[in-house]
Amino acid sequence: MAILAILGLVLRILLQTYVFILWARFVLDWVRVLNPRFRPRGVWLAVVEAVYTVTDPPIRMFRKILPPIRLGAVALDLGWMLTMLSCWILIAILP
């Protein structure tokens, strides 16, 4: 039983870290929207690349399932929200 508790704790910590990385992705996306000339250099380039590399696969998977919703001239992308919601649900059901 202790092994399952430890495994649950490790998974919870990993998911909470992933949620933090998803928030970093959210901020980076808005920085790119508000400042299209934003080009990270040096250490920031490595950090930004790591954030996008880790978060892209699940977001793309949800985009394939539910493509962005067109609202006039704007498209509402639900990939990030569904990924975040999935993480929260998994965190809630872990012991």
Image: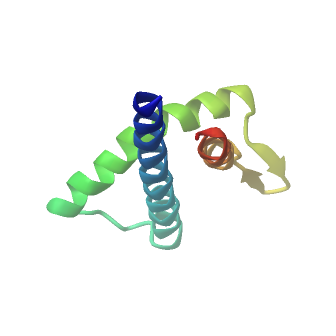
Outermost residue on the right side: it is 72
- For the residue pair 42 and 17, the one nearer the viewer reads as 17
Residue drawn at (78%, 57%), measured in percent from left and top? 73
Q: In the image, residue 62 lies at what x, y percent? A: 65, 33
Foreground residue among 67 and 25: 25
Q: Position of residue 44 (x, y in %)?
A: 23, 62
Q: Is residue 41 visible?
A: no
Q: Which residue corresponds to the image point at 16% horizontal and 61% vertical from the top-left?
A: 43
Residue 63 spot, x, y in % from top left: 65, 34
* Residue 45 pos. (x, y %): 23, 56
Q: Residue furthest left?
A: 42
* Residue 83 placement: quadrant: top right
Relative to 7, say whether 25 is above or below.
below
Going 36% across and 39% down the picture, which residue do you hit? 53
Q: Is residue 58 visible?
A: yes
Left-right relation of 6 to 77: left
Colour setting: rainbow
Q: Residue at x 26, y 55 (%)?
A: 47
Looking at the image, the residue that sits furthest to the front is 1
74 relative to 9, above or below: below
